[in-house]
């Protein structure tokens, strides 16, 4: 595996009703898993000069994650999301004016030409971080993976359409699909035409218990149906786990079918833990062995 994944966006703490705080943020969760799979990801974000920020740096170092792309903000706090659960489904209150809203484009690292760039949409709610992302995307990135997370009131559809334009991969759930696209996902030719207009190569639609599918600009369709795990703690981070393995598939040159099936398997495993990440390397070992991943 040669191409290095670079992940841009939010790092924050999910605060649960029982008072527990769990480090997260979609790009960070994806970076966490990719580090466990041996891909040496680079996380680009901004944290506060506060206790939360210090904890993030300590946690990253302990897991082996590079802190090269982490900026420190003396004026804005480390990000926080207040999470409430209805059954196993999470609902979010996202605190605004957090450090990750102010990623400074003047302090961005230079990307290699074979970079795989991952980003979402939440950090782009602020024009400062959005400008930083646009500057990154102007570099010779080998592949871009956009994983939008539409959280009201933190987005506008016209801005989302510009954000996803030209992506090699776009991932979104079924609700987000209907908000962003004018076509029914079953209208293959019309959807392919809209993907062509947006210069999108591959579209991933996730449907929770009903699985997921990949659509290509040529109209090809791939799908997967998950097996429901015996124990579900919560669904926080399952989508990020899914994305991490789709990215891993691009790094390891897996087929779409392999990537989709393996992403589903890993996301199912994450449903069995509390929160989005786990700091036990043995959790990842069965997947590393089964998928024949090299840690070189």
Image: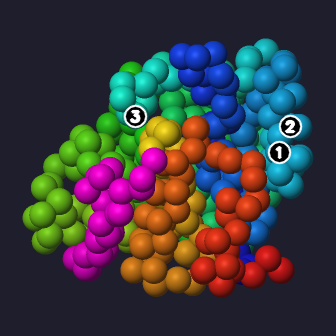
Pinpoint residue 286: horizontal percent, then vertical percent: 64, 71
Asked if disc 1 and disc 2 are in contact, CB closer than 8 Å, the reply is yes
Can you tell which of label 1 and label 3 is closer to the viewer? 3
Spatial CA distance of label 3 from label 2 is: 30 Å
Q: Quadrant of the C terminus?
A: bottom right
Q: Nearer the viewer, residue 77 or 249?
A: 249
Label 3 sits on residue: 88
Q: Is residue 102 visible?
A: yes
- Residue 135 located left or right of residue 205: right
Q: Residues within 10 Å of mark 3 (few under 14, many from 20)?
A: few
Q: Is 226 located above or below residue 97 in the figure?
A: below
| Picture quadrant where residue 281 is located | bottom right
Residue drawn at point x = 10 percent, y = 64 percent:
187
Q: Nearer the viewer, residue 35 or 10?
A: 35
Label 2 sits on residue: 57
User: Which label is found at residue 60?
Assistant: 1
Span shown in magenta: 207-231
- What element does badge 1 sit on? helix
Residue drawn at point x = 29 percent, y = 71 percent:
223
Q: Is 197 located above or below residue 2 in the figure?
A: above
Spatial CA distance of label 1 from label 3 is: 28 Å
């Amino acid at each position: 595996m040669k191409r290095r994944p670079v992940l841009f966006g939010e790092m924050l703490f999910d605060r649960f009703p029982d008072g527990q705080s769990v480090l997260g943020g979609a790009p960070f969760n994806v970076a966490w898993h990719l580090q466990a799979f041996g891909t040496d990801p680079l996380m680009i974000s901004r944290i506060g000069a506060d206790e939360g920020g210090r904890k993030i740096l300590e946690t990253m170092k302990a897991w082996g994650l590079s802190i090269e792309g982490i900026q420190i903000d003396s004026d804005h706090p480390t990000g926080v999301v207040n999470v409430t659960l209805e059954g196993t489904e999470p609902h979010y209150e996202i605190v605004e004016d957090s450090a990750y809203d102010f990623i400074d484009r003047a302090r961005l690292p230079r990307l290699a030409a074979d970079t795989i760039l991952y980003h979402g949409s939440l950090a782009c709610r602020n024009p400062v971080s959005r400008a930083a992302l646009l500057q990154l995307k102007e570099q010779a990135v080998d592949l871009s993976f956009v994983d939008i997370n539409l959280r009201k009131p933190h987005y506008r559809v016209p801005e989302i359409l510009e954000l996803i334009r030209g992506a090699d991969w776009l991932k979104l759930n079924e609700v987000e699909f209907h908000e962003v696209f004018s076509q029914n996902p079953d209208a293959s030719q019309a959807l392919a035409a809209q993907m062509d207009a947006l210069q999108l190569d591959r579209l991933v639609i996730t449907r929770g218990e009903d699985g997921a599918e990949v659509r290509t600009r040529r109209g090809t369709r791939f799908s997967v149906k998950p097996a429901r795990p015996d124990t579900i703690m919560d669904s926080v981070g399952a989508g990020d786990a899914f994305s991490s393995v789709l990215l891993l598939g691009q790094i390891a040159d897996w087929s779409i079918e392999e990537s989709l099936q393996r992403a589903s398997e890993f996301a199912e495993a994450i449903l069995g833990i509390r929160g989005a990440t786990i700091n036990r390397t043995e959790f990842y070992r069965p997947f590393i062995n089964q998928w024949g991943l090299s840690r070189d």
